[in-house]
Structures are given as C-alpha cells and as structure tokens.
C-alpha cells in the first residue's frame, strides 16, 4: 500500500516538471543561448557545456552526464548571473532564472 506522503512527493515532482515556457516568452538572451546550443557554440563562458548533475532533483532523473548547463547572459551582471539553460541529450531544454531553484521546460 502506498502512503499519502509517497503520493504527495510524486505529485509535486510531476507538477514541477509540468512548468513550461514557450521560446517566444524567453528573454532575448535565452533565445540567443538556445540558438548557440543548437549550433554547438561558440559560448561566452568557460563553464558552458559542463555537466549539470541535477543535485536539486528538480529535473527528471537521468544518468550522470545526460544534462549540460549553459549561461544565459544577464544584462548588467558582472558575473555569469543566475540565468541558465540546461539541455538534455534527448533534445529537451529547461530554463532557470533563479540559479537552479526552479525550472521551466522550453517549448519550441
């Protein structure tokens, strides 16, 4: 028998993965980063293309190396800022504007 807590945790995971954003609603810098990812660069930041480990567990569980992270430039930021796109090997893309505290799957 499944406990209500197990069901609640599973439901939260499903809801977290259900958040989406159309490409047309992304900031222009995110659209540019997405284009760069699809054409394999060139990237502005050394960490672009690094393995994203999904330690927060907010994205679907996959084997290590499945996800890669890319910086989305933040106007006025002196560093990489908080915005990222995480790309999965299966062709899915996720946008985070709060340094991995939340994600929205990009709908093309």
Image (spheres, grey):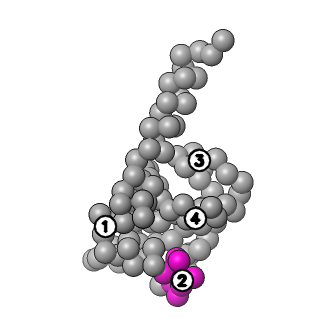
User: How many angstroms separate mark 2 from mark 3 (CA)?
Assistant: 25 Å
Specify whether residue 79 is in view.
no
The relative height of residue 9 versus residue 93 in the rendered view (above or below) is: above
Question: As drawn, which residue projects farthest toward the bottom?
Answer: 42
Question: As drawn, which residue projects farthest toward the top?
Answer: 1
- In this rendering, position of residue 5 left or right of residue 21: right
Where does the C terminus fall, quadrant-wise? bottom left
The relative height of residue 20 versus residue 82 in the rendered view (above or below) is: above
Residue denoted by label 2: 39
Residue 29 location, quadrant: bottom left
Residue denoted by label 4: 91
| Residues in magenta, as a range | 36-43
**In this view, the mark in front (1 or 3):** 1
Mark 1, other Cα within 10 Å: few <14 / some 14–19 / many ≥20: few
Comes first in the chain, label 3 or label 4:
3
Comes first in the chain, label 2 or label 4:
2
Specify whether residue 90 is in view.
yes
**In this view, the mark in front (3 or 4):** 4
User: How many angstroms separate mark 1 from mark 3 (CA)?
Assistant: 24 Å
**In this view, the mark in front (2 or 3):** 2
Residue denoted by label 3: 60
């Amino acid at each position: 028998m499944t406990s209500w807590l197990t069901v609640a945790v599973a439901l939260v995971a499903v809801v977290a993965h259900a958040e989406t954003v159309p490409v047309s609603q992304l900031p222009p810098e995110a659209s540019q980063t997405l284009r760069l990812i699809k054409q394999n660069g060139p990237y502005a930041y050394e960490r672009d293309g690094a393995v994203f480990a999904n330690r927060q567990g907010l994205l679907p569980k996959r084997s290590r190396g499945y996800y890669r992270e890319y910086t989305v430039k933040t106007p006025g930021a002196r560093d990489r800022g908080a915005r990222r796109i995480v790309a999965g090997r299966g062709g899915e893309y996720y946008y985070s504007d709060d340094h991995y505290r939340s994600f929205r799957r990009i709908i093309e």
